[in-house]
Amino acid sequence: MLLWIGSIRKFFERNIRFVWQETKDLTPVHNRWVRWLLPGLLVKRWLFLSTVGVLTVGLGTMIWLKLTPVFFTVQFVETVLREITRLIPRYVSGPLAILFGVSLIIWGQSRTLGVITEVLLPNSQEASLWDAIANHRKLNRGPKIVVIGGGTGLSTMLRGLKRYSANITAIVTVADDGGSSGRLRREMGGLPPGDIRNCLAALADQEKLVTELFQYRFSSGSGLSGHSFGNLFLSAMNEVTGDWEKAIAACSQVLAVRGEVLPSTLSDVKLWAELSDGRRIEGESNITKARGRIISIGCTPADPPALPRAVAAIKAADYIIMGPGSLYTSIVPNLLVPEIVDAIAATRVPRIYVCNIMTEPGETDDYSVSEHIHAIDRACGRRLFDAVLIQKRSPSPTALERYRKQGAERVIFDRDAVIASGRRIVIANVMHETENGTIRHDPPRLAKVLMRWHSRVY
């Protein structure tokens, strides 16, 4: 019986969506009313239930009063209708009454929806209530996505992914010890807030304004110069709540974040790296400054405990994405947490690594795609992802020259070596190049490719 009902529902859903596709060219008013017919909004069923409730209350009242109101009401209506049809023929009065009733229904519902829209979307000029409800339902039905990394690469990807799902968990590195984050970490203790701040801003509902506010850096003031507002806000929230996990959750509520941001561990970890020339460098910010070839990397204390919620998110995930971002200082630090690695390895969902477009001086000099892959495998001691996403089109000569002056080159795609590693290859144009030659992953393109690959293999 349930299967039969489900089949009928899918049939009507497909046909109504077909009608919706065919009526996109209608006027905005007609367009709006057709869209309300689409199933899955969870609005029409509750309106219908409310109407049934009103009728039931009226019926119950009449039964309670021994049907006396029904008798007099029928008599009154019969008398009124007889007089109306005597003055105006029924083939005229009937349609007029129907049109008048339909007009009242449309007017009342439009005004009701208009008032609700003004309350729920006070600052929106274009979005309608239908858009808000449909978007909310679509995002909440989206796959459970876990993204792992740090730095600007992770926040860039989150800006695109949040258009497809509200069930996003960003697991962020806490090894940063440079800049504003490093200063706050040394002076106040606890976690560096920089990468967490970037991800919260990227997932916020009002992303543009929040990003500008959270990324604002004070240029003057004793003790304030160089700090970003977002870092101070997170640190203050930690002092108020007394716990970093609670502080991040509270900030997420304030910013209306789609999804959640979690540190991979709450331990005060410090990165170290051994270079090919025998040096051992300690501190995340010092590793890239050393300008050596990294042969192994670890952290102190070794094997830090994972945040339980991060492990639970990985176990419940439908899709796991690593990168993009600095290989040794943004992605690998998360994989130095054994429970994180074990949880990823135990999953049977699609897992993909988004490879960087350019190498990073002092970290991945002359690295190819396969060397990025092998570095991750060495760090965690096993194979964690099934596919790698690689940028297809080469940056412009102007951009390449600009990066070459900084000691960076394009990451070379060594196809045979990648195939030998047993990974699937996903090649697409996911790059955005600015007028001054800055190269970044393009959030919409990157998210579209990632979600398309997930739908194809899952």
Image (cartoon, helix red, strand yellow):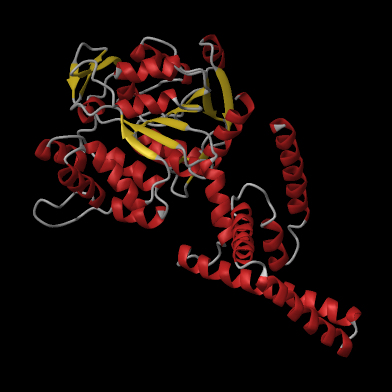
**Taking 112 as reference, is 384 above or below it?**
above
Residue 71 in the figure: left or right of residue 44: right
The answer to whether residue 271 of the structure is visible from this angle is yes
**Taking 81 as reference, is 69 above or below it?**
above
Q: Quadrant of the C terminus?
A: top right
Q: Quadrant of the N terminus?
A: top right
The answer to whether residue 354 of the structure is visible from this angle is no
Residue 203 in the figure: left or right of residue 65: left
User: Residue at the spot x=66%, y=57% of the render?
Assistant: 36
Of 41 and 220, the residue lying toward us? 41
Q: Farthest residue toward the front?
A: 66
Exactly how many numbered labels are in the figure? 0
Of 191 and 423, the residue lying toward us? 191
Position in image of residue 320 (x %, y %): 47, 26
Position in image of residue 156 (x %, y %): 43, 41
User: Which quarter of the figure has residue 8?
Assistant: top right
Position in image of residue 214 (x %, y %): 29, 51
User: Residue at the spot x=71%, y=76% of the render?
Assistant: 73
Position in image of residue 22 (x %, y %): 78, 53
**Taking 369 as reference, is 118 above or below it?**
below
User: Which quarter of the figure has residue 61?
Assistant: bottom right
User: Residue at the spot x=50%, y=28% of the render?
Assistant: 319
